[in-house]
Image: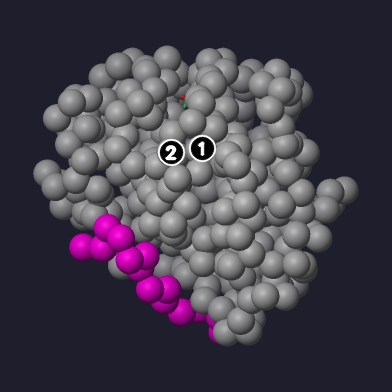
Amino acid sequence: MSTPISLPPDLDRLLFQELGAFHQPRNEVFGLVAADGDEIRRYNGTYLPRTWAESYQVFSQLLRIPGVRAVLASRQAIQVLDVGSGSGGQLLGLLDALQANGLGSIPVNVDLIEGNPHAIETMKALWSRYPRGNRGTIRVAHTRLPETRAEFIPSLDRTIRAFRREPYDLVLSFKFLIEVYGIIGKDASSGLYNDFAKVLGTHLAPKGLLLLLDLTAKPHPNDGTWMGTTLPRETNLLSDTDLSVLLPHPCRRYAASCNTSCYQEVHYPVVVSSIGSSTEAVVWRALAHAPYIDQLASGLPSRLCHQVSFGQYPATCKRTRCSLPAPSAFEV
Ligand SMILES: C[S@@+](CC[C@H](N)C(=O)[O-])C[C@H]1O[C@@H](n2cnc3c(N)ncnc32)[C@H](O)[C@@H]1O
C-alpha cells in the first residue's frame, strides 16, 4: 500500500461544493458510457478522487526518471491523448504531477475520446476552473466507440487520426478498457488489450509515453478473467511493434520470463475531506518505443523500486519489491 495522499482542497471543493459530486460506493463501476447525470456525479464523488491520486502517483514516479522529465521539459507544449477520459481525474493528476516537478508552466494540450456527455461536461468544467497547471487547448471526440471486436480498434484509430495532432507525448487510458471488455463479451475480448496498446503506440511520439491503467476487477461478472492478469499478460510482451514496458521496472527486465504468470495490484489511497481514506486495486504499465527505453534505462540506478500491494509473480520481481517515498506535495 502506498502512503495516503490528500485530495487537493481546491479539487475537493470544486467536486463536492460546486459540481454536486457525492460519495456512494457500489460494487459495479460498469456501464458508465450510458450513465445519466446523477450517476456521473456519483462517479465524481466516489471514484474520481481515486483516479486523481493514481495518476498523480504514477506520473510522479515517471517524472523521477531524469530523462523523462528532461524530454517533457524540452516541449513547447505537451500533447496528450486521453481515451475513455470520463470526467478527467487522470488529467488533473497529470497537471498536479507536472506542477510538483517544476513543469507546471508548459501548456498541456489534450485531445480526448469519451462517449458520455455528462462526463465530458464535468471534465470541461474542471479543466476551465482548475487552479494549477498551464491548461492549453482541449478537443473532444464525443463518440461511443463500437463495442464489437471487429470494429472497436479500427474505429479508435480513425477517431484519433481525425484529431490530426499526432504524434502525442503522452497517451493515457485509465479504467476504460475494462468497461469495453465487459460489453464486448468474454470470448471476443481476448487479446483486446494487446491490440489497444499497439494501435495507441502508432500515435505515440518517438519519445512519448503510453500509460495504461485499469482496475484489477473482473470485466465479466461470471468468469475468472481478472484485469490484474489480463493487462500484464497482454502488454508485457508486444509482438510486431517496438513498444515495450518502461515501468514497472521488473517488467522491463523480466517480461520474457514472467509474462504468463504475472498478476499484480497496487493501491494509491487518497484522503477526501468528507469521506476519509478511499482506495481501489489497480494495475498499470507505462510503455514506450524501445530505443527511447534503452536511452532512459542507461541512466537509471541499479537498485529500483517495484511498488506493489499484492501479487503473484516470480522471484525476480519479488526481489525488486520495496516501497517508494510518497511524492512531496499533497502528503497527508
Ligand atoms: C470507468 S470510467 C473511467 C473514467 C476515467 N478515465 C477514470 O479513470 O476515472 C470509463 C469511461 O469510459 C467511457 N466509455 C466506455 N465505453 C466507451 C465507448 N465504447 N466509447 C467511448 N467511451 C466509452 C465511459 O463513458 C466512462 O467515462
Q: Kindly give the residue lying farthest to the left in the view shown.
A: 274
Residue at the spot x=51%, y=67% of the render?
64
Q: State which region is magenta.
A: 318-332
- Indicate the quadrant where residue 189 lies: top right
Main SS category, magenta section: loop
Q: Amino acid at mark 1?
A: Val
Q: Is residue 326 magenta?
A: yes
Q: Amino acid at mark 2?
A: Asn
Residue 144, position as x, y percentages in the image: 56, 17
Colour scheme: one colour
Residue at the spot x=58%, y=47% of the render?
212
Q: Which residue is mark 2?
A: 134
For the residues labelled 2 and 1, say whether their Cβ atoms are less than 8 Å apart.
Answer: yes
Residue labelled 1 has its Cβ within 8 Å of some atom of ligand 1 = no
Q: Is residue 51 visible?
A: no
Q: Is residue 249 above or below residue 207?
A: below
Q: Which residue is mark 1?
A: 108
Q: Earlier in the sequence, mark 2 or mark 1?
A: 1
Which element carries disc 1, helix, strand or loop? strand
Q: Nearer the viewer, residue 22 or 71?
A: 71
Q: Is residue 52 above or below residue 108?
A: below
